[in-house]
Image (cartoon, helix red, strand yellow):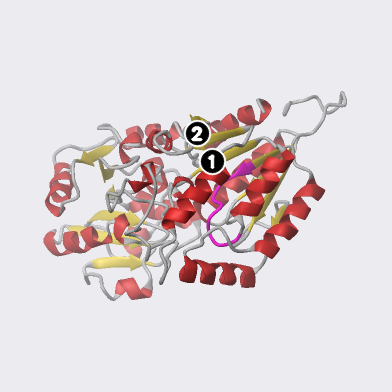
Amino acid sequence: MLSADKEAGGSIMKVLLINSDCGYGSTGRICVDLYKLIVESGNDACIAYGRDCTDESVKNIRIGGKLDVYAHVIKTRLLDLQGFGSKRATIKFINQCKAYNPDIIHLHNIHGSYINIDLLFKYIKEMKLPVIWTLHDCWAFTGHCAYYTYVGCSKWKDCCYDCIQRNLYPASIFRDNSKKNYIFKKELFNGIENLKITTVSNWLKFEVMQSYLNKYDVQVIPNGIDLDIFKPTESDFRQKFDLENKTIILGVASIWHDRKGLWLFNELADRLDNFYKIVLVGITEKQKNNLSSNILVIQRTNDLMELAEIYTAADLFLNPSIEETFGMVSLEALACGTPVISNKYSANPELINEQCGIIVEDITTQLYIDAIQKFKTESIDILECVKKAQQYNKNSCYKKYLELYEGC
């Protein structure tokens, strides 16, 4: 068992976490948090990653290198074969796996052009290791995409073909291989003797149960948040940008896509009066050139304390994305005492109730304006926002994984 008495000679559980990143981005931070929790429990962990690592304090294995990633990306671009490159890197990694000799493999994002899923799953089936697979998006049960709500596609329920998102992540320029990918992934991902799937929301669990993965046990374990960082935090943000007398409407994304609703902020900036100021975090220089001059743009920051200061300074947080498998940015805003306006699509409603925000029924500028103006007459208690976020304390959430490990 994971909690075996080490002094009495109990065995130490070894958990190998596999993700595209280590410490970088939301899934990378989740893996590092899990790693630390496993080690604190008196056991051993290692993070295998293929792209970026921002925390060298953890035991880790790099799967391949930059050239391997570039070659995998090219294979995806030309042949629509995301997940089927990186053969040499994966063979080397599997040998490293055998040397580490894990008791449990915990998969996270296995797309991202760094690992060969054919070789990986053949190794898993051969070794008959217990596997936990945490799904953060929908890529595991489609023939191409990681998200499909924005385009209203449901082909994945039967079999993907003629992919209408071929040119989006993981983008393929020339070829649509979605049908073959779907069939191969279905065969590859099924038939594992001891696989448990976790999803980060009830919405995503519902989707999985309609897919070819529905034969597996599926449990919801939501993402956790570091409440020591994301909390009401004083700063000079308003003074720094001369916003003392403004109602700040904030939007945050690590990468702004159309599905994140960037167009909405542009329209709001042109329609709302000078009483409001829109602030967007994570905008690139190229995107900035296409935005209204009424929007204050802040480039992406990896400084979480700075991000907490910005969340706290805002009066309202808008998350117009319709493809949120969890909605981490909404949760971070709530933890900092800022109410959230979002929509009814995907997992958004799971984090927001009438005590801490508003859910609009559709993605229209007018509905969001109505919701924004509603806050003029109906205030929301900051403490209610924080209270909602406290339900997702990362230590409480991730201890559920320890229980899963113990049951393997």
- Distance from Cα at disc 2 to Cα at disc 1: 9 Å
Label 1 packing within 10 angstroms: few (<14), some (14-19), many (20+)? many
Up/down of 363 relative to 171, above or below: above
Residue 382, by quadrant, is top left
x and y percentages locating residue 271 in the rendered image: 12, 61
**x and y percentages locating residue 105 in the rendered image:** 67, 41
Residue 31 place in picture, x, y as percent:
60, 46
Q: Residue at x 80, y 24 (%)?
A: 5
Residue type pointed to by label 2: Ile
Q: Is residue 215 visible?
A: yes
Q: For mark 1, what is the residue?
A: 134
- The residue at which mark 2 appears reads as 221
Residue type at the position of mark 1: Thr
Name the secondary structure under disc 2: loop
Cβ–Cβ under 8 Å for marks 2 and 1: yes
Stretch of the chain drawn in magenta: 106-114
